[in-house]
Image (cartoon, helix red, strand yellow):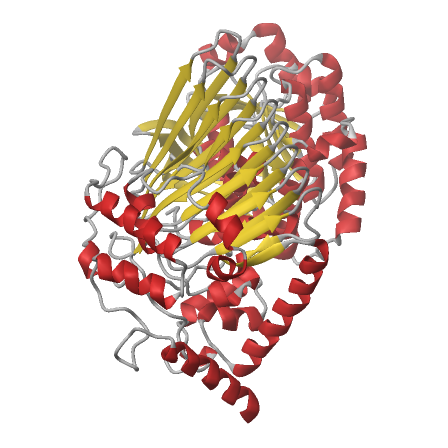
């Protein structure tokens, strides 16, 4: 589904990713771990198309479609979803209005029926229940005055509504207490399916107790230095990143 | 149909008969401004002597005044001798014959705003016979409804003829002729405008709007509006319309006066979208307006809501004098500037009565190379025991070549008052845009959503259907403002 080859990218002249390779097949969950500054968030941003990040070489394809030349909104329409580490506020724009605009745009692009307002409301209510957010939350501004946990749950809510092919979760566990972490993880697990893939970027192993990955990769100095199964995360937890960096 | 045409021709002919213009072909006064111009306008309108005297006095005062320089705007000064000060409604012959002759860009905008064809014709100045007669009938039905309620809603020229005692009592009572340079000029040469009178205890049965008053649509550059709500009366008035006014006049110097007696309530909403000039700042309307209301009676309430997206230069401060005890003044404003537009706008809240309360919510949005200024005065007089004011000024910048400025003035002469002022300046951030885009929302839609969200506090004060149109208007105005 996702094929990244020799990706070199960075921000403002500074190269952060230095020849990164990763292949993700449908149905798989890949965890990307690594020390601070290794380029974990950069990878999510580059795949999501955040302005300011420059790709100097390499490629990234989603089902054979080149992502790197596309506008961020077009990547979203192809089925790429990025759950942000720090979701920003959009004051005065209600969650409902925001979700509806997103759903209409993405569904139309993917050739699905755009739900009627009634159906849309039904979907939104179900998603709210799943991430344990009260319904009146739909009327509030996007992330406006939300706690860290509410913001993250809101990201998962959006992900559920948009039904992406490829979900990139950027340090979704940061700033979450254990209850919120479970809610978020359950949301993600409920969406695991044979035709959807996840790339979960995290600093800590903790999240992976709840979202059990098929593969774990260690990112250091802008490339993947070690890959393994779920057990690699436990090993990292025990030995620290110094162990890998020393070995690399 | 020919009968209808005859009627129109007769109507037009009668205007020439009463005329003072020598050239039959032209319905405008020749350019130039002197005492004779003022006399000619007054004569044309068959005004009583007292009104002519009032105009002449204003004109004499105006000649001694100088154009103000303090606003944060920069423009080529107006040559007052080059303007024509009176233009009668255009005849059929002048305007476009059908929508085919109207600028397609304009039609496109109307369509986006969802304005029905019939109304498009009126706005574009296509004076087709059917439209005229349709309008007449709309006009009449709603005049009947209003008359039953005792409400007077007419052009100010008609009111001068029909209700001279009311006009004499209130004209210039809120904005005196000598108030300022442009108001003074308006007092001398005002052409027409709206008059509303809501008698004691009456709640006006419908929203009033200049939009329906077709005959006032070509009233030209010096409009004069007077609204009076007697004891316990209430009215909501909508000025302008959301479609871009096809206006060739360079200078607009209007005066609006509102008077609210005991327990009366006036809500005045404006959506202004005059020609802003092109991206380089060529052309465009100068909008130099004096709008002021007085809460004359106790417990009275005046509320200004404005959405301003047009004009090249705007100089406008809708104000409230809170004279009655417990009276309330409100100002809700959205001013959007783009291209090379300059807006210096805000409000004045003058607290005189006890326990008077004012709220100011001003949202300025600047894009491209525009300059957007909030300028506001809150004055608490020594008599205004227990006065309260809350001011919130928020500026939103799109791009980095525009400017936003806030000049709040506070004069407090009573130690029991509570004055709160909050101001923020923010940018449409790359993070916000990226969040929207990453969810599949196109850039322009995203910007418009963010800007509409920013304006929400003000839009919710607009009458429902107006709020929707104001939102669409912002969307259209923002097109192409993000590269």
Residue drawn at 19 percent across, 60 percent down? B82
Where does residue B370 sit, x and y in percent of width and height?
A: 31, 42
Q: Report the quarter where the N terminus of chain A lies.
A: top right
**Furthest residue toward front:** B49
| Residue closer to the observer: B346 or A116 | B346
| Residue closer to the observer: B54 or B405 | B54
How many numbered marks does the figure carry?
0
Specify whether residue A229 is in view: no
**Furthest residue toward bottom:** B2
Residue drawn at 22 percent across, 65 percent down? B31
Write down the quadrant of residue A59 in the picture: top left
- Is residue B89 left or right of B455 when viewed as pictured? left
Q: Report the quarter where the C terminus of chain A lies.
A: top left
Q: Is residue B60 above or below residue B16?
A: above
Where does residue A161 sit, x and y in percent of width and height?
A: 71, 41
Write down the quadrant of residue A16 in the picture: top left
Specify whether residue A117 is in view: yes
- Is residue A13 left or right of B293 when viewed as pictured? left
| Residue closer to the observer: B120 or A85 | B120
Where does residue B157 sit, x and y in percent of width and height?
A: 46, 60
Residue drawn at 29 percent across, 51 percent down? B56
Where does residue B72 sit, x and y in percent of width and height?
A: 27, 35
Write down the quadrant of residue B385 in the picture: top right
- Is residue B26 left or right of B451 when viewed as pictured? left
Q: Is residue A83 above or below residue B134?
A: above
Q: Is residue B407 above or below residue B138?
A: above
């Amino acid at each position: 589904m996702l094929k990244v080859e020799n990706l070199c990218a960075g921000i403002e002249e500074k190269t952060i990713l230095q020849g990164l390779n990763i292949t993700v097949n449908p149905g798989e969950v890949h965890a990307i771990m690594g020390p601070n500054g290794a380029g974990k968030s950069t990878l999510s941003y580059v795949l999501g198309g955040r302005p300011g990040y420059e790709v100097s070489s390499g490629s990234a394809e989603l089902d054979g479609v080149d992502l790197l030349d596309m506008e961020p909104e077009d990547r979203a329409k192809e089925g790429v979803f990025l759950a942000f580490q720090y979701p920003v506020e959009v004051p005065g724009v209600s969650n409902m209005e925001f979700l509806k605009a997103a759903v209409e745009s993405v569904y139309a692009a993917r050739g699905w029926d755009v739900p009627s307002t009634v159906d849309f409301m039904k979907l939104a209510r179900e998603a709210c229940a799943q991430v344990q957010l009260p319904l009146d939350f739909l009327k509030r501004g996007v992330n406006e005055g939300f706690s860290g946990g509410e913001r993250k749950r809101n990201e998962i809510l959006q992900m559920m509504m948009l039904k992406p092919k490829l979900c990139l979760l950027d340090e979704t566990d940061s700033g979450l207490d254990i209850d919120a972490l479970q809610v978020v993880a359950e949301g993600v697990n409920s969406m695991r399916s044979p035709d959807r893939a996840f790339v979960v970027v995290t600093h800590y192993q903790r999240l992976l107790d709840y979202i059990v990955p098929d593969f774990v990769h260690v990112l250091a100095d802008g490339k993947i230095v070690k890959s393994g199964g779920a057990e690699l995360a436990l090993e990292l937890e025990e030995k620290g990143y110094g162990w890998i960096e020393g070995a690399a | 149909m020919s009968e209808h045409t005859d009627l129109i021709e007769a109507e037009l002919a009668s205007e020439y008969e009463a005329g003072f213009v020598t050239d039959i072909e032209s319905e405008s006064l020749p350019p130039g401004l002197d005492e004779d111009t003022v006399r000619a306008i007054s004569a044309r309108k068959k005004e009583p002597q007292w009104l002519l005297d009032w105009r002449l006095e204003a004109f004499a005062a105006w000649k001694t005044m100088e154009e103000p320089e303090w606003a944060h705007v920069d423009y080529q000064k107006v040559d007052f001798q080059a303007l024509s000060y009176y233009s009668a409604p255009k005849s059929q012959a002048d305007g476009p014959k059908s929508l085919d002759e109207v600028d397609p860009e304009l039609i496109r905008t109307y369509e986006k705003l969802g304005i029905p064809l019939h109304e498009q014709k009126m706005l574009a100045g296509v004076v087709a016979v059917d439209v005229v007669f349709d309008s007449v009938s709309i006009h009449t039905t709603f005049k009947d409804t209003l008359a039953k309620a005792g409400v007077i809603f007419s052009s100010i020229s008609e009111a001068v003829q029909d209700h001279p005692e009311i006009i004499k009592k209130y004209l210039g009572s809120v904005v005196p002729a000598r108030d300022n340079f442009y108001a003074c000029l308006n007092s001398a040469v005002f052409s027409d405008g709206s008059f509303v009178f809501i008698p004691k205890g009456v709640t006006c049965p419908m929203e009033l709007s200049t939009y329906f008053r077709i005959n006032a649509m070509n009233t030209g550059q010096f409009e004069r509006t007077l609204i009076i709500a007697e004891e316990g009366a209430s009215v909501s008035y909508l000025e302008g319309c959301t479609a871009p006014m096809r206006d060739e006049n360079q200078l607009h110097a209007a005066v609006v006066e509102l008077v609210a007696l005991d327990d009366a309530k006036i809500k005045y909403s404006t959506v202004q979208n005059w020609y802003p000039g092109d991206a380089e700042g060529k052309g465009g309307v100068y909008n130099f307006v004096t709008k002021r209301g007085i809460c004359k009676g106790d417990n009275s309430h005046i509320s200004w809501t404005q959405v301003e997206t047009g004009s090249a230069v705007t100089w406008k401060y809708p104000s409230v004098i809170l004279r009655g005890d417990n009276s309330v003044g409100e100002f809700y404003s959205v001013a959007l500037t783009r291209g090379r537009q300059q807006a210096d706008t805000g409000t004045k809240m003058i607290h005189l009565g006890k326990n008077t309360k004012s709220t100011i919510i001003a949202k300025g949005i600047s894009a491209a190379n525009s300059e957007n200024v909030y300028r506001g005065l809150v004055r608490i007089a020594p008599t205004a025991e227990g006065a309260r004011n809350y001011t919130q000024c928020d500026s939103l910048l799109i791009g980095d070549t525009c400017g936003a400025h806030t000049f709040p003035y506070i004069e407090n002469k009573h130690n029991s008052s509570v004055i709160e002022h909050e101001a923020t300046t923010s940018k449409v951030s790359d993070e916000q845009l990226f969040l929207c885009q990453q969810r599949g929302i196109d850039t322009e839609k995203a910007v418009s959503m963010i800007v509409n969200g920013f304006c929400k506090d003000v839009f919710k004060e607009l009458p429902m259907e107006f709020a929707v149109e104001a939102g669409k208007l912002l969307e259209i105005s923002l097109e192409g403002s993000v590269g």
